[in-house]
Every structure is written in C-alpha cells, then in structure tokens.
Amino acid sequence: MEKVFKADALRLACKSLLELCATTCLFVFSAQALEAQQPDGRPETKYSIERIDTEGNRRVETAEMRACIISRPGDAYSAKTVRRDVQALRDTGFFEDVRLEVEDSPHEPNAKIVVFIVRERPIVRRIEYRGIKTITEPEIRNALNDKGVRLSVGDWFDQTKLARAALVIDGLLSARGSPSATVKATFERFASTNTVNIRFDIDEGPRPQPSSNPQ
C-alpha cells in the first residue's frame, strides 16, 4: 500500500509541476508578445501630450498644419503617430523640410511637448524668358499647362519642375522651326523674403534655310 501511495503522490506532483510549467510558459509568451508590440521595452501610454507647437511656418497658417496632424494635446504620446504626422506635413508640398522634436514637460513628469519644425518652400516672385524671338510668353505658358508643368508667379517653388519646363520650351521651339535651340533654366533665391526669381535663357540657334528647287 505504501508503494501505491508513493506512486500516486509522485503522479500528482508531476501533474502539478506540468501545470505550473504550462502556466509559466503562457506568462512568458504573453510578456514577449507585449514586448514585441513595444520595441523599446516601455509602454508609451504612460506619457501624455501636454502641448503641440509649430515653428518656422510663415505663409502656411498654423491651423492648416494642425489639420494635417492627428496627435492632440491630452492624447497618449505615440512615437508612431507623431512620425506619421511628420510625413503628413511633408506630403502637403508646402515644406522643403519637416523635423520633429519631443521634449519633456517642465511641469508634468509624465508629459511630452511635441514640436514640428518646418522650412517652407519659397514662392515664385518672377519668371523671365530671355532670347525668345519666334514664340511668345503666353504660348510658353500654354505649352507648360498642356504638359502639366505648373509654373506660375505666386506658386510654391519646386526646383524639379525647371528641367521639365526647359524640355517643354525646347520642344515648342523645335516645332516652330528651331530644332537646334538651347534652353537653360536658372533661379535666384532671396532668403529675406523666401522668394525666387526664375530665368530661362533661350538661344533659338540658326533656323534651317528652305531648300531651293532646281530649275
């Protein structure tokens, strides 16, 4: 009987040990899953957003910027969300650069101050076409619009459009009988007003002479 009792006790102890191991493994797995969701090992939700500031915007209204930002004062701070806010501001096309700074609140130990620092694109102040003879400025503007190259005074400046605009003007000149024309696009930036002047220097080149028919 004593041997039977010891065997039953051993089986009971093993069963309890297996249950304890299973519970421990489940706890470890849950902890690992939680840590995988929070890579830095600490829950972001212990921080709240005390304030959201914007810096560097002059022409773009702060209200316009805030309309693109999901984060709000009083929300739980989320690094993923504020990174999304940075990208949303970049996608507006108003800014050459958008930076993010997150500061500890001097008033609340568990609060953050989120600052979006932007550098606006300059505004086109003037567009000048030098050297044109066989085409006019309205014709150039129409050709640019037809090709989807928006380049107008008062627009946000986009340097990548200059090369496309030069190609459109070159194509227009070629169609008008100046296949050897050259078009060079340059711009001058004025930091004090954050504006640019654009200039296209155009050399239409020699025009082909009409061939004479032999008599």
Image (tube, rainbow, N blue to C red):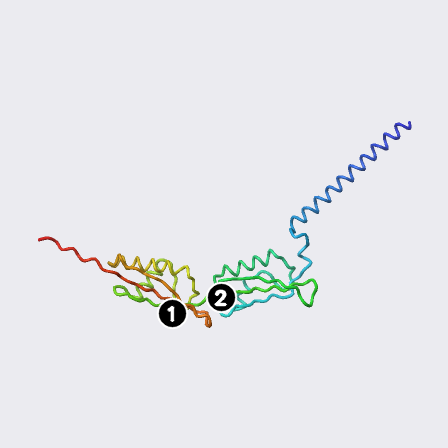
Q: Are marks 2 and 1 in contact (CB under 8 Å)?
A: no
Q: Give residue 68's position: percent from left, percent from top.
A: 54, 62
Quarter assignment of residue 21: top right
Q: Which structural element holds mark 1?
A: strand
Instruction: Using the image as rendered, state which of residue 168 and residue 66 is in the foreground.
Output: 168
Q: Give residue 76's position: percent from left, percent from top.
A: 65, 59
Q: Give residue 35's position: percent from left, percent from top.
A: 67, 49
For residue 181, side relative to residue 59 (left or right):
left
Q: Check the picture and name the quadrant holding the N terminus.
A: top right
Residue on which the image places disc 2: 120
Residue density around tag 1, few if under 14, some if 14–19, many if 20 or more, within 10 Å: some
Residue on which the image places disc 1: 126
Residue visible at 51% across and 62% down in the picture: 97
Residue visible at 49% across and 66% down in the picture: 120
The kind of residue tagged 2 is Glu
Residue 200 vertical placement versus 34 (above, below): below
Quarter assignment of residue 201: bottom left
Q: Earlier in the sequence, mark 2 or mark 1?
A: 2
For residue 208, side relative to residue 92 (left or right):
left
Residue visible at 28% across and 62% down in the picture: 203
The kind of residue tagged 1 is Arg
